[in-house]
Image (cartoon, helix red, strand yellow):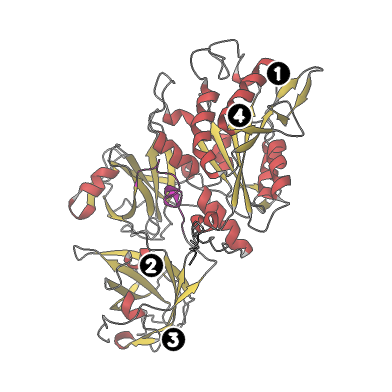
Amino acid sequence: MWAPDKSAAPPPKMDSRYTSTAGIGDLNQLSAAIPATRVEVSVSCRNLLDRDTFSKSDPICVLYVQGVGNKEWREFGRTEVIDNTLNPDFVRKFILDYFFEERENLRFDLYDVDSKSPNLSKHDFLGQVFCTLGEIVGSQGSRLEKPIVGIPGRKCGTIILTAEELNCCRDAVLMQFCANKLDKKDFFGKSDPFLVFYRSNEDGSFTICHKTEVVKNTLNPVWQAFKISVRALCNGDYDRTIKVEVYDWDRDGSHDFIGEFTTSYRELSRGQSQFNVYEVTLLSFLVETEVSFLDYIKGGTQINFTVAIDFTASNGNPAQPTSLHYMNPYQLNAYGMALKAVGEIVQDYDSDKMFPALGFGAKLPPDGRISHEFALNGNPQNPYCDGIEGVMEAYYRSLKSVQLYGPTNFAPVINHVARYASSVKDGSQYFVLLIVTDGVISDMAQTKESIVNASKLPMSIIIVGVGPAEFDAMVELDGDDVRVSSRGKYAERDIVQFVPFRDYIDRSGNHILSMARLAKDVLAEIPEQFLSYMRARGIKPSPAPPPYTPPTHVLHTQI
């Protein structure tokens, strides 16, 4: 191994249309309403229960977070499945926003995966752990060990949770490795080698950050090039130790250790070099600066918001206090609160603050025809309202003139926005449809088809669910765990974000508990959805205009 050259110039930069996660942090620079530090949580387990008869368990970890208001548990994300192990170190991390002033309750559920079904009830439960994000961050070295519980009378093993604050390094690196004459570990045939990368922590321990694929039956593997953010590889610290282990893959999970070497980002950045210890060679190393959501906004991309409100009878008679549309002269109803709260967040990103506002599921005057796409201001040629206040006024005016009816069809309003989005695909505009609904949907098949079609367009859909209903259909449309599909065609990308409004209001239903958390959750997926469209189309941000400088006045003096 060579000694690191501290004076070595950082690696060559290349612009890229590929980016990794852009989060709410990008929006944060535009709106100061979201006070959070981003924290990456890594999960490992030791001595899990063995639920498989002829092999070891195939564990997955599922993280749930608790709503601020009603304390309901909602799934946040899942790790990958690791085959045949009772001691998994999961590569996939959970990136959470850490609010110092709020108690953020977390639940980690472990399952032994028995099939390809995304439905967790089809798999064996291995236990669970409850803690708070503050507990992990506040533990010594931000490393929390807890016993796994949940199966009476059984020892379920231990979970190890580590947290690291993410820095804002926006580079990613594309690397490729090969190896020569590796140790032969298989009795019959050659080895099946793969590499595992770890970054070192301040306490001397290591956190897994990447696994290559397995190259079958060779002692001279060439692994596929892979892309990893510099944040994941070394959290932006060029001299932090990176450890690479070489293994021979075995079906039963007892992979044979071939060897290991250590390096650093700075060493790797010096390009094609050999790690003499185990004949592993770095073939290429290319740094790409990742573009962010904000780069497009600064470059002039316009965000267009459209609001669509559910006027169906399942909301209840607006004259009755139990109705979600109740017209209370003294305070906002559930729709009014959700519209105002969410609208005030999103209007910051709409340059002209003129919102088309639509209603669906009502009978319209004078003839009582049913409409699933009507202008709240009564003007179908120009459905625009001035700011969120204009939307609120049009909403209350509509409530007085239309009759709540049904059915609850989402497809017409989605198709309405899709028509506009399909006419501007050059990256200069992006469309966001905000649907506020009680969640009782009638046209699920057509809505799925509309979402699959819209996933090819520059648009996203935010669904805010109001009221007490079970929102299973809305969660299905969200597509975080299973991509939405229609007639065998899958959505090109995830474009739906669902937020249940009751998670953010107190028991009386009159006060929003956390505007910052609501803002974050409503907008959480928009930057990544936006970037996934731009990446897929190869659209780069336009250069930002130069900062404005006032003209200088030349003073002419007479001689």
Reading the chain from its start, which is encountered first: label 2 or label 1? 2
Reading the chain from its start, which is encountered first: label 2 or label 4? 2
Disc 2 from disc 3: Cα separation: 27 Å
Residue 81: x and y, percent? 43, 57
The residue type indicated by label 4 comes to Val
The residue type indicated by label 3 comes to Asn
Q: Which residue is mark 2?
A: 230
Q: Which residue is mark 1?
A: 402
Q: Residue at x 67, y 54 (%)?
A: 456
Determine whether the residue tagged by mark 2 lies in a helix, strand or loop.
helix
Q: Main secondary structure of the magenta part?
A: loop
Relative to 390, say whether 349 is above or below.
below
Q: Is residue 60 visible?
A: yes
Kindly identify which numbered label has been placed on residue 220. 3
| Crowding near the residue tagged with mark 3, few <14, some 14–19, many ≥20 C-alpha atoms within 10 Å | some
Disc 2 from disc 4: Cα separation: 44 Å
What span is colored magenta in the figure? 21-36
